Amino acid sequence: MSIPNSLTAFPGGQSANIQSQSSSGAAEGITDPPIDDLLHNVSSKYALAIFAAKRARQIQDYYAQLGEGLLEYVGPLVEPGPREKPLSIALREIHAGVLQHSEGA
């Protein structure tokens, strides 16, 4: 049985629709913006991972507090896409230069 590129078979005959990466289009998220461009804003790839994760957590907490009427956290500083994840938003903020990284923070 042949399985198309965009489908993956699971036990029991079920299948899940998984989009394959084509050479004609670039994937969103971790490859956009490119990691090499992001590394110009921080001292190392480890610092980038921690910096982006902390900011993504702040964005996640911002969305969680909206229903409660609290304004403790700062929302996205770039225009988020309709289904964009907090980590992707954080990486785009770093790439846009709206966040500054300081060592040890």
Image (cartoon, rainbow, N blue to C red):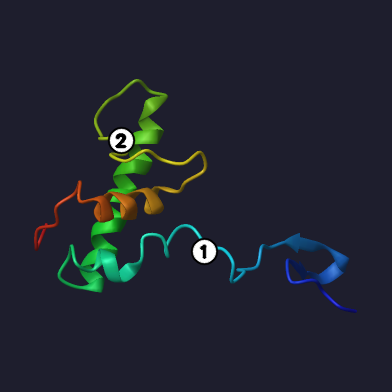
The residue under the point 74% across, 71% down is: 5
Q: Position of residue 43 (x, y in %)?
A: 15, 70
**Would you say the residues marked 1 and 2 are in contact, meaning their CB atoms lie under 8 Å apart?**
no
Where is residue 96 drawn, in percent x and y?
25, 50
The relative height of residue 73 versus residue 87 in the rendered view (above or below) is above
Query: Furthest residue to the top?
Result: 69
Say which mark, if any, is on residue 75. Answer: 2
Pinpoint residue 78: horizontal percent, then vertical percent: 32, 41
Is 26 above or below relative to 74? below
Q: Quadrant of residue 3?
A: bottom right
Q: In which quadrant of the rendered image does the C terminus lie? A: bottom left
Work out whether mark 1 precedes mark 2 in sequence or the reverse, and give the earlier one: 1
Residue at 60 percent across and 68 percent down: it is 21
Mark 1 lies on residue: 26
Quick check: 11 above or below 84?
A: below
Kindly state the secondary structure of the residue where label 1 is placed. Answer: loop
| Most foreground residue, 51 or 31 | 31
Which image quadrant: the N terminus? bottom right
Separation of marks 1 and 2 at Cα, in angstroms: 27 Å
User: Of residues 10 and 37, which is closer to you in this image?
Assistant: 37
The image's mark for residue 7 is none
- Residue 101 relative to residue 27: left or right: left
Q: Secondary structure at mark 2?
A: loop
Residue 75 rendering spot, x and y as whole percentages = 30, 35
State the residue at coordinates (29%, 57%): 52
Q: Residue furthest front?
A: 24
In the visual, does 69 lie left or right of 20?
A: left
Foreground residue, 20 or 15? 20
Residue type pointed to by label 2: Gly
Closest to the observer, 35 or 51: 35
